[in-house]
Amino acid sequence: MNRCNTPVKAVGGKGINAGRTAAILGSEVTAIGVLAGMNGQLIRSALEKEPFSTSFISIDGESRNAVTIMDQAKNQTEIVELGPKITAATAQKVLDSIITHVLKQDTTPIIALCGSANTQNDALYEYYLQQLHQSLHSQIKILADISGKQLQHVLTSSIKPYFIKPNIHEFSDLLATTVTNKNEIIPLLNHPLLEGISFILVSCGKEGAVAKFCGRMFNISIPSIDSINPTGSGDATVGGVAFALEQELPIEEVLKYGMACGMSNALETAVGYVSKQRVEQLKEEISVTEISLP
Ligand code: ATP
């Protein structure tokens, strides 16, 4: 019997958390996806209070629960359900909805493809990338916060995402190796599998991150903080990056926004939530250093 005295319940998922973060910073955001069953109804009504608009398709099944268990040392164990089955027809409806929304905008928005889908099709995101490139402006910036087989497929595809954000563990899995620190990651950013992706950010929790942007490498150091709940910090990082890219800020600022959002989320009890004021303060304490490889 394990009792939990301080449960935190949140409506989220990678896309919603990233979208909320970008919206809090000032972006106009639409979250697009699927909802199912009783959980879906609960999520739909909770989303009415969010600072972004939504376009969710109702499908059969049940939207998933994800349980994160955090011990006193802040180590996390995640138990994530598979979620409702995403059929080819549903996947197509979601894609059509993204395209319709983008075409309605006066300016070209940034698209973030986030999270995993319970599908037999390991190439689903590869298909999305190809279709989005074909239907929209070919220079559109697509951020992919995905992992596992879906990410592997995307990397071998002819159309690449503009940005990926694996964490250090996902990065190890991707390159079938074991990296334990930033120094080991840096040379691997030149791995042939990552060719063609303009912007790679490997997040390393409280150690900050390393990045490769248009051939340039960066080390991002963050100050030590008394984190409360880092669940969703990666999602908040993606939201911060999306906001800063939309503002066309210099890469150093984009990286600072990403990190500051991850940190701000870690300083909240809530999951996938940042304080705009705190993000602006934290940004000042983050250092971005360009690395030149020998
Ligand atoms: P999640 O899957 O929980 O969304 P992630 O594993 O994808 O997270 P992390 O590398 O843990 O992503 O965190 C992203 C960023 O958030 C880090 O690069 C850092 O800026 C910030 N961050 C995360 N955890 C901490 C922490 N404990 N202290 C300070 N900053 C943190």
Image (spheres, rainbow, N blue to C red):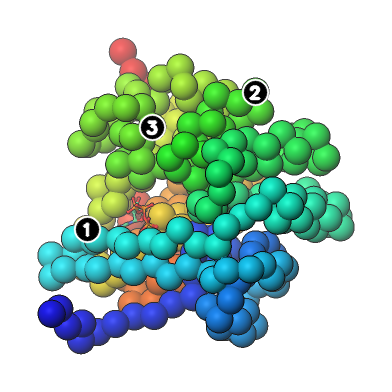
Q: Quadrant of residue 229?
A: bottom left
- The Cα–Cα distance between marks 3 and 2, rounded to whole angstroms, is 18 Å
Residue 36 image point, x, y percent? 60, 71
Query: Residue shown at 25%/68% (left/top)?
Result: 69
Q: Can residue 142 be seen from the camera position used here?
A: yes
Query: Mark 1: is the Cβ under 8 angstroms from ligand 1?
Result: yes
Q: Are marks 1 and 3 in contact (CB under 8 Å)?
A: no
Label 3 vs 2, first from the N-terminus = 2
Q: Residues within 10 Å of mark 1 (few under 14, many from 20)?
A: few
- Position of 262 with respect to 177 (left or right) is right
**Residue at image coords 53%, 69%:** 63
Name the residue beneath numbered marker 1: 224
Q: Which mark is residue 158?
A: 2
Residue type indicated by callout 3: Leu
Q: Earlier in the sequence, mark 1 or mark 3?
A: 3
Q: Is residue 78 above or below residue 138?
A: below
Residue 21 visible somewhere in the drawing: no
Three-letter amino acid code of the residue under disc 2: Ser
Q: Quadrant of residue 166?
A: top left
